[in-house]
Amino acid sequence: MLELGCGAARWSIALAKLGARPVGLDLSSQQLQHARRLMQEAGVEFPLIEASAEEVPLPDTSFDIVFCDWGAMTFCDPYRTV
C-alpha cells in the first residue's frame, strides 16, 4: 500500500497498526521527519520515501493499493501520477 503525499503519515500509521504494510511518500523532508516521530510513538515502522508523486522511484507493479488523502490530483499531473 502506497500513501502519496503522506505528510505525517497518519493514515499509514493507523493502517500499520491493523497489520497493513504501508509505504509513505512525500516531497517534504520536514513532514517525513514528523512522520518518523509519530511512527515511533505509535510503535510501528514502515518505509518513508522523499520523492514526487509524479516520479515514484519504484516499479509500477510495486503496490496493490495507492491512495492520497490530501488530493495529489490537484497538485500533480494526473497522467504522470496515475
Image (spheres, rainbow, N blue to C red):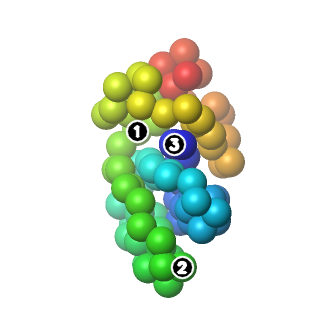
Task: Indicate which label's residue lies in the foreground, 2 or 1.
Answer: 2
Which residue is disc 1 drawn over? 52
Which residue is disc 2 drawn over? 42
Which residue is disc 3 drawn over? 2
**Which residue appears at 35% of the width and 60% of the height?**
29
Comes first in the chain, label 2 or label 1: 2
Find the residue positioned furthest to the bottom.
Answer: 41
Between 82 and 29, the residue placed more toward the observer is 82
Task: Indicate which label's residue lies in the foreground, 1 or 3.
Answer: 3
Quadrant of the rendering where the C terminus is positioned: top right
> Helix, strand or loop at disc 3?
strand
Q: Is residue 12 above or below residue 75?
A: below
Q: Position of residue 61 (x, y in %)?
A: 43, 23
Comes first in the chain, label 1 or label 3: 3
In the figure, residue 78 lies in which quadrant? top right
Please say if the residues under marks 1 and 3 sit with CB atoms less than 8 Å apart.
Answer: no
